[in-house]
Image: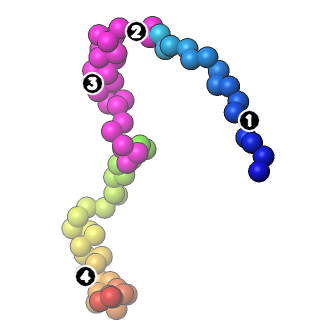
């Protein structure tokens, strides 16, 4: 078989931080305080939607839907 030629890797360059550890910790604390720190993807775009109906109105609609046979119930 043909021999595989190995390409040379580029020379390693060391990462040089422009911030101190204290700078990074301060930014982290500020982000937490501002609510800007995402712990997971589930935290993104969480929107609270307020209902235009009271709890009692929703319950009354449920009772009426049951009485009218409009509620589909599945035991599966």
The stretch drawn in magenta includes residue 13 = no
Q: Can you tell which mark lies on residue 26?
A: none
Image coords of residue 60 (percent x, y): 25, 75
Q: Which residue is mark 3?
A: 33
10 relative position to 12: left or right: right
Q: Earlier in the sequence, mark 2 or mark 4?
A: 2
Which of the two discs, 1 and 3, sits closer to the camera? 1
Work out whether mark 3 precedes mark 4 in sequence or the reverse, and give the earlier one: 3
In terms of secondary structure, where does tag 3 sit? helix
Question: Residue 63 shows which numbered tag?
Answer: 4
User: Disc 1, disc 3: CB below 8 Å?
Assistant: no
Q: Nearer the viewer, residue 15 or 26?
A: 15
Q: Earlier in the sequence, mark 1 or mark 3?
A: 1
Instruction: Decide: is 19 above or below 44.
Output: above
36 in magenta: yes
Disc nearer the start of the sequence (1/4): 1
Rounded to the nearest angstrom, the CA distance separating label 2 from label 4 is 62 Å
Residue 64 drawn above or below residue 31:
below
Element carrying mark 2: loop
Nearer to the camera, 67 or 8: 8
- The foreground one among 41 and 45 is 41
What range is drawn magenta here? Answer: 17-43
- Using the image as rendered, state which of residue 74 and residue 27 is in the foreground: 27
Q: Are the two marked residues, 2 and 4, in contact with CB atoms closer than 8 angstroms?
A: no
Horizontally, residue 69 falls left or right of residue 4, namely: left
Numbered label attached to residue 19: 2
Name the residue at 61% across, 17% down. 11
Q: Residues within 10 Å of mark 1 (few under 14, many from 20)?
A: few
* Marks 1/2: CA–CA distance: 41 Å
Q: Which sits earlier in the primary sequence, circle 2 or circle 3?
A: 2
Q: Which residue is mark 1?
A: 5
């Amino acid at each position: 078989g043909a021999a595989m030629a190995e390409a040379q890797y580029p020379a390693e360059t060391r990462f040089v931080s422009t911030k101190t550890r204290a700078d990074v910790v301060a930014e982290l604390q500020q982000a937490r305080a501002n609510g800007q720190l995402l712990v997971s993807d589930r935290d993104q775009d969480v929107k609270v939607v307020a209902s235009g109906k009271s709890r009692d109105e929703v319950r009354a609609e449920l009772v009426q839907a049951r009485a009218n046979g409009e509620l589909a119930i599945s035991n599966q």
